[in-house]
């Protein structure tokens, strides 16, 4: 267990901070995904055809293309894109875009494609009567959305959101190819310098299992909370 | 740019190969563990349960790294005849993919068997069909039909998963795409070409499953 010692002699502290990094990237990514999903789900639900098409294009592409390819696109593409914009403003140097940002963005866009489908399904599953009843009761639109529609939506969407979270969490391991020091990258570094890949990759697997186990517990509690009335 | 197109198409062959082989082996692994899951012997049940729990709870990248980089460290494995298999990235990738898709497939099969109505089985038994007949003529066809939509998704996930073969030096579609991007610095164009090839394959799988579903729809 000396390999996992906290401090200079072992890899315990490095792996601890790498785990925090994985969590940070995953949370940032899933919120970027939610933001995109809110936009694209409303596109998919709208009556305007071109918006429908844009929504479908987004979900088809980012659910059909491998995550790794999307990450390479952003990894190699982002600094080029930023430098292009900077050139317009007269800056001519090399700009390196933050690995955390490109990672969270690429995973977020993929996660958003899955969330879009979840949000769309959740809205569609609410009974029309709920909207009508709220209006008949004279409730304001803003009020009944927050107090009537969204709580019901959350109950139905939570199991699926839990799934998207698990996918997003596991996808963050792919960001290691860009050099961001999360669990996989740190294990790679540790495995290289100690020549003990079996131990460190197995330990990485345990860390991921711990994270997925923990989030499953958390989502179960949330689900219980939101299905109180049923 | 244009001259890199044949290279991408060539790499697609490896991607298809990896996908098909992993899916083929994965079906057997999945069926095996789904059967174990229904076993009344506790230890068999737990083996199946934890197998699927571990492989579904960790990223595929970790699994492929453990098998390719990790197992090479085990002394007795290196000296045994199995080393022929474990020293090659190609076979290691297929083993990792097979075990991964097997875990998901076992869950799909399990839930498909669980949703079969009890009345159907009782009716079949009441008619005097033998256990083997009930399994092959009643349970299996229903379960296959039940699991098709979910299995179609799993096929697409596996296709995307094979892109990780590029992390263990294999030159599949994603691997070649990355190589071209890093030498030409044309990420967008390469992404569009490679992405379209992947989308085309997803589209084919999607429609293949749809046609199968229609064929197996006994209610019509």
Image (spheres, helix red, strand yellow):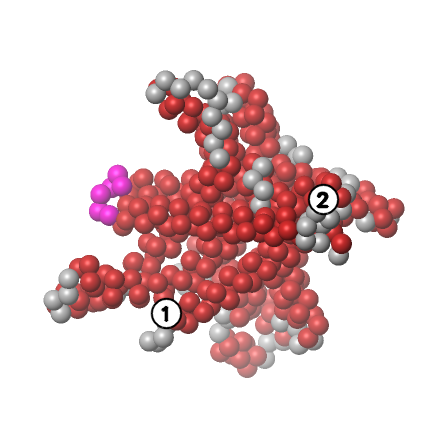
* Circles 1, 2 touching at the beta carbon (< 8 Å): no
Q: Return the residue at label 1.
A: A226
Which region is colored magenta?
A: A46-51
> On screen, A194 above or below A75?
below
Identity of the residue drawn at 66% across and 76% down: B40
As for residue A50 lying within the magenta part, the answer is yes
Q: Nearer the viewer, mark 1 or mark 2?
A: 2
Say which residue label 2 marks: A191
Foreground of the two, B14 or A128: A128
Circle 2 residues within 10 Å: few <14, some 14–19, many ≥20: some
Q: Earlier in the sequence, mark 1 or mark 2?
A: 2
Relative image position of residue B115 (x, y in whole percent): 49, 70
Residues tagged by mark 1 and mark 2 found on one chain of the structure: yes
Task: List x then y, in percent, for residue B69.
Answer: 73, 43
Q: Is residue A100 left or right of residue A15?
A: left
- In this rendering, the count of numbered labels is 2
Q: Is residue B119 or residue A16 the one in the foreground? A: A16
Q: Does residue B135 appear to the left or right of A200 in the view shown?
A: left
Q: Can the viewer see residue B22 in this picture?
A: no
């Amino acid at each position: 267990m000396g390999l996992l010692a906290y401090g200079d002699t072992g890899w315990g502290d490095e792996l601890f901070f790498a785990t925090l990094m994985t969590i940070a990237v995953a949370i940032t990514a899933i919120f970027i995904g939610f933001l995109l999903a809110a936009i694209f789900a409303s596109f998919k639900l709208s009556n305007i055809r071109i918006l429908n098409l844009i929504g479908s294009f987004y979900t088809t592409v980012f659910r059909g293309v491998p995550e790794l390819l999307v990450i390479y696109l952003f990894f190699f593409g982002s600094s080029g894109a930023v430098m292009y914009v900077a050139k317009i403003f007269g800056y001519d140097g090399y700009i390196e875009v933050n690995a955390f940002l490109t990672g969270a963005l690429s995973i977020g866009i993929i996660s958003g494609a899955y969330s879009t489908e979840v949000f769309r399904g959740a809205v569609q599953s609410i009974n029309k009567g709920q909207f009508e009843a709220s209006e008949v009761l004279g409730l304001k639109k803003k009020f009944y959305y927050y107090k009537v529609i969204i709580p019901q939506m959350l109950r139905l969407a939570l199991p699926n959101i839990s799934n998207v979270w698990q996918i997003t969490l596991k996808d963050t391991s792919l960001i290691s190819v860009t050099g961001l020091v999360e669990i996989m990258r740190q294990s790679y570094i540790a495995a290289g310098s100690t020549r003990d890949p079996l131990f460190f990759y197995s330990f990485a697997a345990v860390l991921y299992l711990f994270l997925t186990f923990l989030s499953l517990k958390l989502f179960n509690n949330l689900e219980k909370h939101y299905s109180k009335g049923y | 740019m244009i001259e890199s197109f044949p290279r991408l198409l060539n790499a697609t062959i490896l991607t298809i190969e990896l996908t098909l082989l992993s899916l083929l082996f994965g079906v057997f692994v999945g069926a095996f563990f789904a059967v174990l899951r229904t076993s009344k012997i506790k230890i068999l049940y737990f083996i199946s349960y934890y197998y699927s729990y571990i492989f579904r709870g960790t990223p595929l990248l970790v699994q492929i790294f453990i098998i390719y980089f990790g197992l090479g460290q085990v002394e007795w494995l290196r000296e045994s005849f199995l080393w022929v298999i474990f020293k090659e990235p190609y076979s290691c990738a297929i083993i990792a993919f097979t075990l991964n898709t097997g875990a998901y497939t076992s869950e799909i099969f399990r839930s498909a068997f669980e949703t079969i109505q009890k009345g159907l089985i009782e009716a079949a038994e009441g008619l005097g069909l033998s256990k083997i007949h009930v399994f092959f003529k009643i349970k299996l066809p229903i379960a296959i039909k039940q699991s098709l939509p979910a299995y179609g998704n799993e096929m697409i996930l596996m296709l995307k998963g094979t892109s990780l073969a590029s992390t263990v030096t294999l030159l599949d579609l994603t691997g070649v795409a990355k190589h071209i991007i890093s030498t030409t610095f044309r990420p967008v164009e390469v992404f569009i070409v490679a992405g379209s090839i992947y989308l085309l394959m997803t589209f084919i799988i999607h429609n293949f499953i749809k046609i199968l579903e229609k064929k197996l729809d006994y209610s019509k």
